[in-house]
Image (tube, helix red, strand yellow):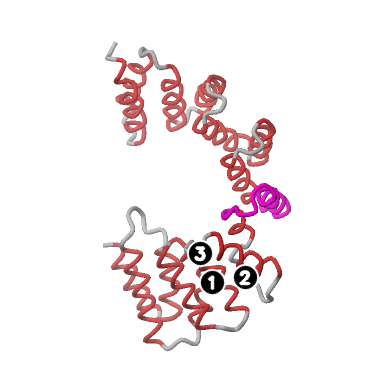
Amino acid sequence: ATHPKNAPLLAFSTQFFANGGHWNEAHEALQSLESEDHHLLFLQAATYFHARRGNRKSAREYGESWLREAPLAENARHSYLHQLTMESGTEAGVQCVQAWLKHQPDNEMLEYTLFELYRELFNDEAIEALLGNALRRNPDDAWAWRERTPPTERTVLTDDLAVGLEACTRICPDHPVTAIIKARHAGILGIARESLRCYVEAVERDISLLSHVGELLNALHGVPREERAAILTQFEERLLQTTGPLTGAGDLSVLFAEHLGRDSAREALKRWAR
């Protein structure tokens, strides 16, 4: 057997080789890890290995063993939940997390996981109840206020938007989603320039907020072409500063096409693909 301190390295190697499809190397690392005195790491690596290989039955069995031995471990729960929802659907995942929350009602990670599952199911009533519980427990819960005041399309200034804006401005004034909420608020009030400024501020802080492309399309209407071009160039520079996949490129290309023309969008896509 190898030295026990190599167990974390063997676990990492198993996942690394599995990610690259190097199954022989991954299996060798997993076998070496099994001989180490670190059973939880072995169960974690084995669950990952079999899940990546597509062996769902083995992945589920190892995942269940891992969860039995570490029932409160977040990574064990996350892995088990992923396998469960893949095999039995999101509703099964909801029931599972609800059961965990009965034993840990103040576990915010579980609460957030349940929120994401509800969102997959478009269960607005359950989402509202969950966020309401979070705010009763902690009236200054910034996450709950931001999610309770979503940047969706609205045509009237509702009480929840106004209250949510006040809370987010007080609790997390610099959060990019707070800027989105400010933009919606200003847009509803007809303050177009302030609305656009807040949208630009939000995207500058978090380029993933380009996903609100419909709202940005509306905010840019009526703005002189030169100014629109400058804003979109600013977004492009921010996009190209990110690491990893350019996940906002599709949304930004829509803005280019709508406000600067299809030829401009095609040229932009070519630049980003280089």
Q: Which mark is residue 153?
A: 2
Mark-to-mark CA distance, 2 and 3 = 22 Å
The residue to which callout 3 is attached is 173
What amino acid type should be assigned to the residue bearing mark 1? Answer: Gly
**Residue 64, position in %: x, y?**
56, 23
Tell me if residue 156 comes above or below residue 13 in the rendering.
Answer: below
Mark-to-mark CA distance, 2 and 1 = 9 Å
Q: Nearer the viewer, residue 27 or 37?
A: 37
The residue to which callout 1 is attached is 214
**Residue 85, position in %: x, y?**
59, 37
- Which numbered disc, 3 or 1, marks the residue closer to the eye? 3
Residue 134 is one of the magenta-drawn residues: yes
Residue 10 is drawn in which quadrant?
A: top left
Contact (Cβ within 8 Å) of mark 2 with mark 1: yes
Q: In which quarter of the image is the C terminus?
A: bottom left
Name the residue located 64 percent from the left edge and 49 percent from the top edge.
138
Q: Nearer the viewer, residue 168 or 265?
A: 168
Q: Earlier in the sequence, mark 2 or mark 1?
A: 2
- Which numbered disc, 2 or 3, marks the residue closer to the eye? 3
Tell me which segment is drawn in magenta.
122-143
Q: Which of 163 and 61 is in front in this view?
A: 163
Residue 224 is drawn in which quadrant?
A: bottom left
